[in-house]
Image (tube, helix red, strand yellow):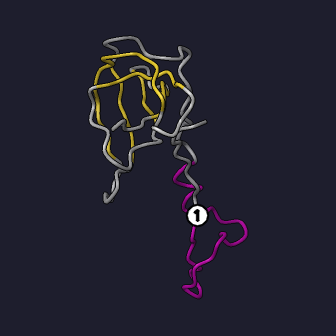
């Protein structure tokens, strides 16, 4: 694929309560902090339709450059078209243009439809 896609790798540094040292895995029989955090969270699912329709509401989730937290913006689909990802790309990609702000660093994050499903992957076209 010729565009950004954000992948998350969880590195859990658990602290040994006896020594205070950081461990790369929890002690035997213990749950790591990330295991506890992620345990009951559902995974994102892809939308059944490949592209939202005009005027559909879409939320974009990202981690903008220079920020310390996740950013969520919301907008509507204002255009559906095909475009190349950048000037070096030979492939035309199907795009859904939305009026929500996509900040530098948000590229690769999910675009979520009004049913909570992933409708696409965000990227900023300059």
Q: Nearer the viewer, residue 18 or 11?
A: 11
Does residue 100 appear left or right of residue 87 in this picture?
A: left
- At label 1, counting other C-alpha atoms closer than 10 Å, the crowd grade (few under 14, some 14-19, many 20 or more) is few
Q: Position of residue 56 (x, y in %)?
A: 34, 15
Q: Is residue 30 magenta?
A: yes
Left or right of 72: which side holds 34? right
Q: Is residue 71 above or below residue 18?
A: above
Which image quadrant for residue 42? top right
Is 111 colored magenta in this rendering? Answer: no
Q: In this orientation, which residue lies closer to the viewer: 46 or 40?
A: 46
Pick out the residue farthest to the bottom. Answer: 19
Quadrant of the frame with the C terminus = top left
User: What range of the chain is rendered magenta?
Assistant: 12-38
Q: Main secondary structure of the magenta part?
A: loop
Q: Which quadrant does the N terminus fall into?
A: top right
Element type at marker 1?
A: loop
* Horizontal arrangement in the rendering, residue 112 relative to residue 5 (left or right): left
Vertical side of 61 occupied by 75: above or below: above
Residue under the image location 49 percent in, 28 percent down? 118
**Residue at (35% x, 11% y) in the render:** 54
Please provide percent x and percent y for residue 104.
34, 48
């Amino acid at each position: 694929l010729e565009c950004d896609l954000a992948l998350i790798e969880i590195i859990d540094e658990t602290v040994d309560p006896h020594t205070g040292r950081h461990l790369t895995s929890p002690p035997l029989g213990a749950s790591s902090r990330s295991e506890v955090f992620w345990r009951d969270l559902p995974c994102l699912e892809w939308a059944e339709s490949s592209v939202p329709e005009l005027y559909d509401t879409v939320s974009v989730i990202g981690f903008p450059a220079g920020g310390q937290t996740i950013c969520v913006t919301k907008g509507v689909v204002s255009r559906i078209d095909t475009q190349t990802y950048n000037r070096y790309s030979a492939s035309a990609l199907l795009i859904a243009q939305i009026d929500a702000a996509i900040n530098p660093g948000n590229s690769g994050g999910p675009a979520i439809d009004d049913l909570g499903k992933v409708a696409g992957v965000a990227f900023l076209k300059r």
